Image (spheres, rainbow, N blue to C red):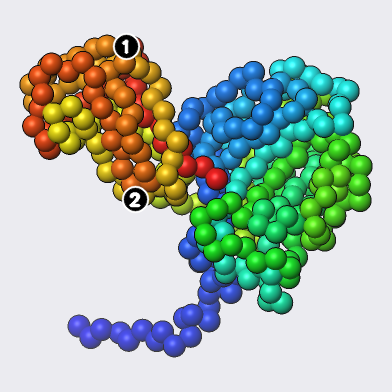
Amino acid sequence: MALSRIDTTNMIEDVPQSKLDNNINFRNIIINGDMSIAQRGTSASSISSGAGFDTVDRFSRYINSGGTWTISQSTTVPSGQGFAKSLKFDCTTANGSLSADSELSFFTKFEGQNLQYLKKGTSSAESLTLSFWVRSNKTGTYTCELYDNDNTRAVGKTYTISSADTWEKKTITFTGDTTGVFGNDNGASLNCTFFLVAGTNLTSGTFSNGTWESATTANRASSSQVNLADSTSNEWYITGVQLEAGTTASDFEFLPVDVNLHRCERYFRKIGDGMGGAVNALHTMSGGTCIQPPLRANPSVSLNTTSIKVGDFYSGDYVSTSSAITLNRCTKSDVNIFINGWSTPWSAGRPITFWGTSGGTFISLDSEL
């Protein structure tokens, strides 16, 4: 049987340019924009002050006199868009009379070495387009901001939630900034911030409204910014957050869960989460593990409990004390621990297990920006 010849001459022309443009790997500058990774836990309650990472990876919050909140990873998502998770802010103690320094903001940060292609600080600076899905019972005006940490510059724009308790997709384009080059290093060069509460310290100036300028605290948020903290009925959801070069928002870039987790673990990682963990014996009284790939920088390190057991994987012997492990040294590529109270030394290279006497135990490595 003769095989028919397929003419492929014009096949590429049949693919819409928009489809070709969307086929760019890692175009989303934001990591974990679909809120699917939450290594620290899925819910945190009674959050009322300070900065910190509570639930979903790569996103932090800052609260000052801005109510009390439960922050959680939620399964409430826009229908038919491919998302499985969102992040939810739920007001549990209201503040209807804001002080001048009141603030509730939600933000993520980016390394300068990942932003060089934006050509910031040159005449060819790229515009940036932010897109996201948002939902709240509190309609009105909200503020988004890009903040250049390297050069203390900022630009803000607003978006409007028009319908209560309805998912809405928002798109905001920021022009390129021809002033101030991002540092080519692993430091925090750029923040992307969502304001939910803003006192007059943030709103009393002339809002930048799309124009990059030297950062001025009073200009950071719009004077029309809603107070999401004014009622315990208030809640705010977000997912599908994407920040990309250009003036058009492309479809959200979904990544495989292993790729997404791997990117998050550059900044925060757990060793031995759940049932416990294992390290290789370095010598008779200590063990270590290699971190691959390395974290962003030398991390802060903590053990979630000292009430643990440490054992030899081969013999099954173990020791249980109130301080069985001492964290000795940690760099961005390895962790070294001392094991206290062990009566039967082991040979170098043999695996050592550790586990919680009640529930899981783990070592947390924090290298966040």
> Badge 1, how many Cα within 10 Å: few under 14, some, many 20+?
few
327, 98: nearer the viewer: 327
Query: In the structure shown, which secondary structural element does the residue marked by tag 1 occupy?
Result: loop
Q: Earlier in the sequence, mark 1 or mark 2?
A: 2
Name the residue carrying label 1: 322
Q: Give the side of residue 312 with respect to residue 125, left or right.
A: left
Image location of residue 125, percent across then percent down: 68, 71
- Picture residue at 87% right of the left edge, 31% below the top: 100
For label 2, the SS is loop
- Quote the CA–CA distance across marks 1 and 2: 32 Å
- Report whether residue 67 is seen: yes
* Three-letter code, disc 2: Pro
Residue at image point 10% right, 19% down = 344
In the image, is residue 206 above or below residue 330? below
Q: Position of residue 209 (x, y in %)?
A: 85, 55
Q: Looking at the rendering, which quadrant does residue 243 occupy?
A: bottom right
251 or 194: nearer the eye? 194
| Residue receiving disc 2 | 293
- Residue 341 drawn above or below residue 253: above
Q: Quadrant of the N terminus?
A: bottom left
Q: Is residue 367 left or right of residue 305?
A: right
Instruction: Please name the amino acid that badge 1 sits on.
Output: Ser
Residue appearing at x 24%, y 19% in the figure? 340
User: Viewed as shown, does residue 185 lie left or right of 194?
Assistant: left
